Each structure stands twice: as structure tokens, then as C-alpha cells.
């Protein structure tokens, strides 16, 4: 049985997993779940993921995995080359902390269901929503910039000479910032690492605009 990946071109959590699957050279069957149309709320998808969120990876033995960071760590443990985490325990903790700034602190506040709730329950219009997104995206990515500045050694990628878990989380978040019109041009390290990653096929091929379900 081949792996099956449920995602959506514009979902940053799906974007993370696409990058990792590409880096690992792991093939999979793709099925799009249209978030804007609410396909994730369907009874059929709820049977796949009761949380009704993306992404979902069905492994080649039929196991279902949810939550992007869990999927990324499973991929790294199952397909160890190239490694997404350093071998040193302290460095591994720092990489995980950086990834969690994005996955746990920034991303949940830009999630479609959160933005929908702000609009439906509190009447947030486009201007208010933009202010909300700018507040949390900018604060989070500025924290990432400061973490990068504090590294023991300044490297080509977030925490090494090859991309890993931190870069996999950073690139989709920078894409989200651009999509929501958040100016991060002053974040020198973040923008340089993002540009460097985008030159790599594994990252370039995972870009939302290159996905089969992309909508201009």
C-alpha cells in the first residue's frame, strides 16, 4: 500500500509535510481537502481525522497520522536520511523550540477556524483581521529572528549547513506572512534563509503555487 497524504495547497501545515516528504524522497498519493469549501468538516473526512484538520498521512501499512510536527518526526525516525534534527540533544531541543514558536505560537492564531470565529462572533472586518494577523505573525517571526541571532554559530540554514525541521517550519510561515501582507523585510536572517531554502528543489516543488489543487 502506498502512502496517502491529505492536504491543501494553501495550508501551511500541509506545506511543511510536503517539504519533508520531498527532502526524504518519499512518494505518496495526494488527496486535496478544500479548506475554504469546508471539506474538512464532512463526515467522510471526520472518519479519517476526528479533529477535522489537515494534514493527515496514511502510512504504507495503513496507520493514520495527524498533526504536522508529529508527522515530521515520524518521517525523520522512519526515513533517517537526510536527518531533520541534529544529533546533539541540546541542539535538538533548540531546533524543536524554534519549530514550536511557529507551530504552537504563530500558526494557531492565523488558522482559518480562528479567523472565522473572529468574524462570526466578534464582527471582525478585513481591517481588524489584518491587524490581528500582523500582530501575531510579526511578533512570532521577530522571535525567530532573535533566536537565529543567538545561535552559537551562524549557518546557511536555521541550525546547520543543511535544512532541517526549523527550516521546514519557517518557509511556510514566511509564505503566510506574504499572503497576509505582513512586512518582514527587516528580518534579515529569516528572509535570507527563506530565500536560500527556496532555491532547493524539495522546497520549491512544495510551494503552494506548484500543487495540483492550486487556485490562482
Image (tube, grey):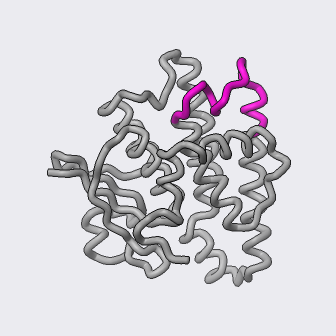
Can you name the residue that lies furthest to the right here? 186
The C terminus sits in image quarter: bottom right
**Based on the displayed image, in which of its 4 quarters is residue 29 positioned?**
bottom left
Q: In the shown orientation, is residue 134 left or right of residue 10?
A: right
Q: Residue at x 73, y 47 (%)?
A: 141
The magenta stretch is 145-164
Q: What secondary structure is the magenta-colored segment mainly?
A: loop
Q: In the shown orientation, is residue 52 left or right of residue 188?
A: left
Q: In the shown orientation, is residue 196 left or right of residue 22?
A: right
Looking at the picture, does residue 156 appear above or below residue 115?
above
- From the top left corner, tell me how far across and down residue 2 is, in percent: 19, 51
Looking at the picture, does residue 24 appear above or below residue 107?
above
Q: Residue at x 47, y 45 (%)?
A: 202
Looking at the picture, does residue 127 appear above or below residue 138?
below
Q: Residue at x 21, y 48 (%)?
A: 63
| Count of numbered labels shown in the rendering | 0
- From the top left corner, tell me how far across and down residue 124 is, in percent: 72, 80
Q: Residue at x 43, y 43 (%)?
A: 20
Q: In the shown orientation, is residue 82 left or right of residue 189?
A: left
- From the top left corner, tell me how far across and down residue 53 is, in percent: 42, 63
Q: Is 159 a magenta residue?
A: yes
Seen from the viewer's position, the closer of residues 146 and 116 is 146
Amino acid at each position: 500500500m502506498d502512502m496517502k497524504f491529505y492536504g491543501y495547497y494553501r495550508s501551511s501545515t500541509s506545506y511543511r509535510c510536503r517539504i519533508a516528504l520531498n527532502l526524504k524522497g518519499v512518494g505518496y498519493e495526494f488527496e486535496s481537502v478544500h479548506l475554504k469549501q469546508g471539506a474538512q468538516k464532512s463526515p467522510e473526512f471526520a472518519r479519517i481525522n476526528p479533529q477535522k484538520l489537515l494534514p493527515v498521512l496514511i502510512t504504507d501499512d495503513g496507520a493514520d497520522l495527524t498533526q504536522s510536527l508529529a508527522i515530521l518526526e515520524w518521517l525523520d525516525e522512519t526515513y533517517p536520511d537526510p536527518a531533520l534534527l541534529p544529533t546533539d540533544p541540546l541542539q535538538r531541543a533548540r531546533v524543536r523550540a524554534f519549530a514550536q514558536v511557529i507551530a504552537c505560537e504563530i500558526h494557531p492564531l492565523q488558522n482559518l477556524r480562528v479567523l472565522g470565529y473572529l468574524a462570526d462572533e466578534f464582527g471582525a472586518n478585513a481591517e481588524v483581521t489584518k491587524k490581528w494577523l500582523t500582530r501575531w505573525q510579526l511578533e512570532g517571526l521577530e522571535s525567530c529572528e532573535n533566536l537565529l541571532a543567538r545561535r552559537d554559530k551562524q549557518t546557511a540554514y536555521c541550525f546547520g549547513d543543511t535544512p532541517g525541521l526549523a527550516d521546514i517550519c519557517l518557509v511556510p510561515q514566511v509564505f503566510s506572512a506574504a499572503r497576509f501582507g505582513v512586512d518582514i523585510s527587516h528580518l534579515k536572517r529569516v528572509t535570507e534563509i527563506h530565500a536560500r531554502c527556496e532555491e532547493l528543489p524539495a522546497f520549491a516543488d512544495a510551494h503552494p503555487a506548484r500543487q495540483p489543487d492550486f487556485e490562482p
